[in-house]
Image (cartoon, helix red, strand yellow):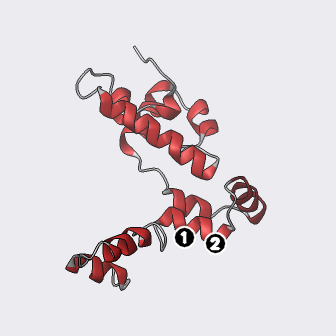
Amino acid sequence: MLIGTPAYMSPEQAALTSVDVDTRTDIYSLGVLLYELLTSTIPFDTRELLKAGLDEVRRVIRTEEPVRPSTRLSTMIAADLTSVSEHRQAEPPKLIREVRGGPGLDCDEGARERTARAGTEPRADWRWMSRGSG
């Protein structure tokens, strides 16, 4: 028996077994929700899922890798990307960069300053990260 909304269903749920259907399934569904919040769409095309039969929906969810959110944003037509960006209060290039994990998300500059003010030396790996060598 299939219970739940297929678009938000984890691969473990789509397998229709009780093995590994636990809190990780909830985390997966939250990830789909985050994907939707970032891109205004879900990882798999709802229209295509609805056209397919139940077995095909289950196969897609279990075996296909969804498009990354940053790729989805990068390949949107300009009008859609502008609309998504406006709703996120960010310029399109900045939104794509931040979703990819670009500068601004990698490290907390405020933490570095607080560490320096506290009179302790930042760790060596922090200095390496702050140079942007990664």
User: Where does the C terminus fall, quadrant-wise?
Assistant: bottom left
Nearer to us in this view, 55 or 117: 117
Residue placed furthest toward the top = 1
The crowd level at tag 2 (other Cα within 10 Å; few <14, some 14-19, many 20+) is few
Vertical relation: 62 (above or below) 67: above
According to the image, label 2 marks what residue?
Answer: 93
Q: Amino acid at mark 1?
A: Arg
Quarter containing the N terminus: top left
Residue 103 visible in the picture: yes
**Residue at x-position 32% and y-position 78%:** 129
Along the line of sight, which residue is nearer the eye, 108 or 99? 108
**Residue at the spot 43% in from the left edge and 73% down from the top edge:** 109
Residue that extends furthest to the right in the rendered view of this protein: 79
Location of residue 74 by image quarter: bottom right
Q: Choose top left, top right, bottom left or bottom right for residue 85.
A: bottom right
Query: How far separated are the C-alphas under marks 1 and 2?
Result: 6 Å
Label 2 residue SS = helix
Q: Are marks 1 and 2 in contact (CB under 8 Å)?
A: yes
Give left or right: position of 22 versus 93.
Answer: left
Can residue 43 be seen in the rendering of this structure?
Answer: no
Above or below, comparing residue 40 to residue 97 in the picture: above
Residue name at image x 58 percent, y 66 percent: 96
Where residue 76 sits: x, y (%)?
Answer: 67, 61
Secondary element type, mark 1: helix
Image coords of residue 108 (percent x, y): 41, 68
Q: Which amino acid lies under the numbered mark 2 shown in the image of this protein?
A: Pro
For the point 52% across and 56% down, the residue is: 69
Task: Say left or right for 7 vs 13.
Answer: right
Residue bearing the label numbered 1:
97
